[in-house]
Amino acid sequence: MSHLRMPVLAVGALLALGMTVPASAQTAQQTLMKQCNVEANARHLMGTSRQTFMQSCLSPPGTRHLALNRQQRRMKYCNAQARAKGLRGADQKRYMRSCLTVR
């Protein structure tokens, strides 16, 4: 009879351990969501800018830098163009100003 209890106890222990892992993961996700909401509120974000921010904030840490807004993508493009043209100093500043204002 004791031989039958061992597998049942082992399965019970495994199920108990399995049930605690998702609960802690859910708590971590909820904590992250709360932090992202606080930061979005502090920045006074609304609409699509809030959605974009929340998506990047809630994404895994390795992919957070990929979610650039339109202005950031434009800045990255203009910087790459200025570097390709070999512009430095005042020339680069002038080019960046004109590049960023053109839509």
Image (spheres, grey):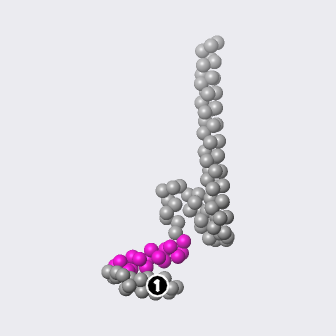
Q: Is residue 79 magenta?
A: yes
Q: Where, by quadrant of the figure, is residue 85 drawn?
A: bottom left
The residue furthest top is 1
Residue 31: give x, y in percent of width and height. 64, 50
Compared with 4, 16 (above or below) is below
Q: Nearer the viewer, residue 81 or 12?
A: 81
Which residue type does callout 1 highlight?
Answer: Arg
Compared with 29, 18 (above or below) is above
Q: Which residue is mark 1?
A: 97
| Disc 1 secondary structure class | helix
The N terminus sits in image quarter: top right
Residue 75 visible in the current orientation = yes
Compared with 79, 94 (above or below) is below
Residue 22 visible in the current orientation = no
Q: Which residue shows up at 65% across the image and 64% down it? A: 42
Q: Which residue shows up at 38% across the image and 85% down it? A: 90
Q: Which residues are magenta?
A: 69-84
Within 10 angstroms of label 1, few (less than 14), some, or many (20 or more) residues?
few
Residue 4: give x, y in percent of width and height. 62, 17
